[in-house]
């Protein structure tokens, strides 16, 4: 059972189907090839976490037993299109061969096609956001800017064995947490919540994003390729030294000597063993769990939100911290 199924919110499954319809409509074009490329990862599925956050923010504002209004569906589709567009670009940067268990767009077609298709998805996301008003459009534009800032900051420190926790946190605030925060904020914006409640939803989404990325980075060194849907240890291979690597470098001279250059796959496996010690994994997961607590606290401080939906959202973020893929 997926995290979304575990939420147990009555209208969510039907509303996510409405989001899927909006996504298919959103990438529609007279150019059949463009539609095929832009739809490639849509067909591969995914957690749909970001649209789920948008919908749940809307439920919390309006009551959990009611279907999402059309604006929430549109907002949910817009944030997922931003996410998909960013994945197309990420796979070019990482030279990834697979994504979600299928060939990446760059592997199946080319880097140029992947970049242009990613741009197309971002443009279509912006078009949907603009239909919700200037405030939502402005927020989504700023969020895309944050995604770029976080990614550029990460690229500035590729193969940097001295990368600090502060630099890591700043990068993931941009590349991951910003979009999850905006996903929640858009759900609140289109539902007319108060400014204080809007800020609480945004903080919740921020901490969900921080938790999600930290766990993702732990799984990169502890999970299998089958579980991940992409090569395990890929961050180490590409020189992206994440929180568990930063923790491990502090105590392993063998690991520090390995880093600073692109590793062969057999060396990556040795590096993964050095990074995935119980002590390193626990230290990293403790940080992830601190964001679970902060996310729950953000919801507890919000006025006018449905208590049952908030309880389910707290369960969602806890599930994200304990997932295995």
Image: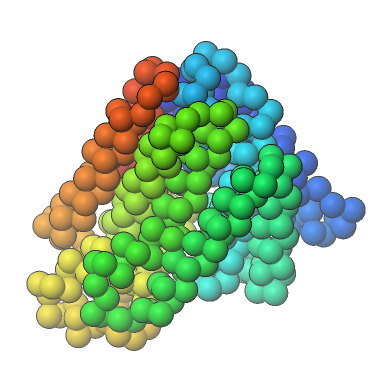
| Residue sitting at x 46%, y 35% | 195
Q: Is residue 48 above or below residue 231?
A: above
**Which of 170/312 is in front?**
170
Residue visible at 57% across and 71% down in the picture? 92
Count of numbered badges drawn on the protein = 0
Q: Is residue 277 above or below residue 246?
A: above
Left or right side of 268 for 309: right
Judge whether residue 325 can be spotted in this image.
no
Give the image quarter of residue 246: bottom left
Residue 276 in the image, given as x and y percentages of width and height = 21, 61
Of 103 and 72, the residue lying toward us: 72
Give the residue furthest to the right.
Answer: 30
The x and y percentages for residue 140 are: 59, 52
Which residue does the image show at 25% across and 80% down from the upper left?
161
Name the residue furthest top: 65
Residue shown at the point (11%, 57%) measured from the top left: 279
Is residue 202 at least partly visible in the picture?
yes
Q: How did the renderer colour the structure? A: rainbow
Q: Quadrant of the N terminus?
A: top left
Horizontal and vertical percent position of residue 166? 26, 67
Looking at the image, the residue that sits furthest to the front is 195
Of residues 10 and 181, which is closer to you in this image? 181
Q: Quadrant of residue 12?
A: top right
Q: Position of residue 58 (x, y in %)?
A: 53, 28
Q: Is residue 102 above or below residue 297?
A: below
């Amino acid at each position: 059972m997926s995290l979304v199924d575990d939420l147990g919110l009555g209208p969510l499954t039907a509303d996510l189907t409405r989001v899927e319809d909006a996504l298919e409509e959103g990438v529609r074009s007279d150019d059949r090839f463009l539609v095929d490329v832009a739809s490639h990862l849509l067909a591969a599925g995914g957690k749909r976490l970001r649209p789920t956050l948008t919908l749940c923010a809307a439920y919390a504002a309006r009551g959990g037993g009611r279907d999402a209004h059309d604006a929430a569906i549109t907002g949910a589709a817009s944030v997922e299109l931003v996410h998909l567009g960013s994945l197309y670009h990420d796979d070019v940067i990482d030279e990834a061969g697979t994504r979600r268990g299928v060939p990446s767009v760059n592997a199946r077609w080319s880097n140029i096609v992947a970049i242009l298709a990613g741009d197309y998805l971002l443009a279509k996301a912006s078009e949907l956001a603009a239909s919700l008003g200037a405030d939502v459009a402005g927020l989504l534009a700023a969020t895309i800017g944050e995604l770029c800032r976080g990614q550029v900051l990460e690229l500035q420190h590729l193969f940097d064995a001295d990368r600090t926790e502060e630099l890591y946190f700043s990068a993931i605030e941009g590349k991951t947490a910003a979009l999850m925060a905006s996903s929640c904020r858009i759900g609140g914006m289109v539902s007319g919540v108060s400014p204080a409640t809007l800020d609480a939803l945004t903080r919740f989404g921020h901490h969900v994003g921080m938790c999600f990325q930290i766990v993702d980075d732990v799984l990169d060194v502890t999970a299998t390729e089958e579980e991940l849907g992409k090569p395990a240890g890929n961050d180490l291979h590409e020189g992206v030294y994440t929180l568990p690597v930063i923790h491990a470098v502090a105590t392993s001279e063998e690991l520090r000597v390995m880093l600073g250059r692109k590793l062969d796959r057999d060396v990556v496996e040795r590096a993964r063993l050095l990074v995935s010690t119980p002590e390193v994994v626990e230290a990293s997961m403790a940080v992830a769990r601190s964001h679970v607590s902060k996310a729950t606290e953000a919801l507890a401080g919000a006025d006018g939100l449905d208590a049952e939906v908030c309880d389910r959202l707290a369960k969602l973020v806890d599930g994200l911290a304990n997932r295995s893929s």
